[in-house]
Amino acid sequence: MEGVRPRPEVGELLARLAPRYRLAVVSNGGARQREKLARAGLERAFAAERVVISSEVGAEKPDPRIFARALAALGLAEGEVLHVGDDPVRDILGAQRAGLRSCWLARGAYPAELPPPSFAIRALAELPALLEDAG
């Protein structure tokens, strides 16, 4: 836990996006995920009910139930949400199965056997422009 630090651009990005978008976290993990967010200084970007953790939901990504919980917390429909993640199966396929648009934060090669994401970016800094373009 002592080593938990976000990439420098993450806090700035969240501060930029929070006034315009409803943000949520969907995380596989245990109760310490909330502590990690706090230690990283990122918890203020998310309302507590919008931090959706698999151990609290009883379902892990790629299970559609965890995404449904996030949708309920956001008060949005499937077509109004873009899920951003770096895991092709847990994040991208999971979001697709839940009816969400998906954005892959590219880390290596995307598996050819999986349906492609709605969008792909190489760095989080690309996300604001993508959101503007995607509407």
Image (cartoon, grey):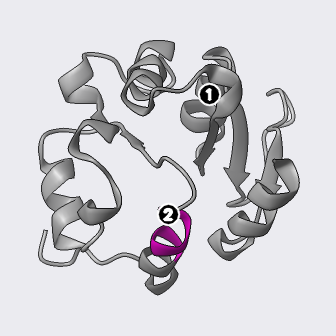
* Residue 83: x %, y % from top left: 60, 40
Q: Is residue 57 magenta?
A: no
Circle 2 Cα neighbour tier, 10 Å, few/some/many (<14 / 14–19 / ≥20):
few
Label 1 to label 2: alpha-carbon separation: 24 Å
* Residue 120: x %, y % from top left: 80, 53
Tell me the quadrant of the picture where the N terminus can be found: bottom left
Q: Residue at x 67, y 26 (%)?
A: 100
At label 2, which amino acid type do we have? Pro
Q: Is residue 46 left or right of residue 67?
A: left
Residue 126, numbered label: none
Q: Is residue 37 above or below residue 101?
A: below
> Residue 38 appears in which quarter of the rendering?
bottom left
Q: Is residue 93 left or right of residue 115?
A: left
User: For mark 1, what is the residue?
Assistant: 95
Q: Is residue 14 magenta?
A: yes
Say which label, 1 or 2, has the lower sequence index.
2
Q: Is residue 21 left or right of residue 47?
A: right
Q: Which residues are magenta?
A: 13-18
At label 1, which amino acid type do we have? Ala
User: For mark 2, what is the residue?
Assistant: 19
Residue at the extreme bottom:
8
* Residue 106: x %, y % from top left: 72, 58
Residue 93 shows in the view: no
Q: Residue at x 29, y 78 (%)?
A: 5
Residue 115 shows in the view: yes
* Residue 110: x %, y % from top left: 79, 46
Q: Residue at x 67, y 76 (%)?
A: 125
Of circles 1 and 2, the one toward us is 2
Q: Is residue 10 above or below residue 93?
A: below
* Disc 1 element: helix
Q: Is residue 14 above or below residue 70?
A: below
Q: Is residue 116 above or below residue 4?
A: above
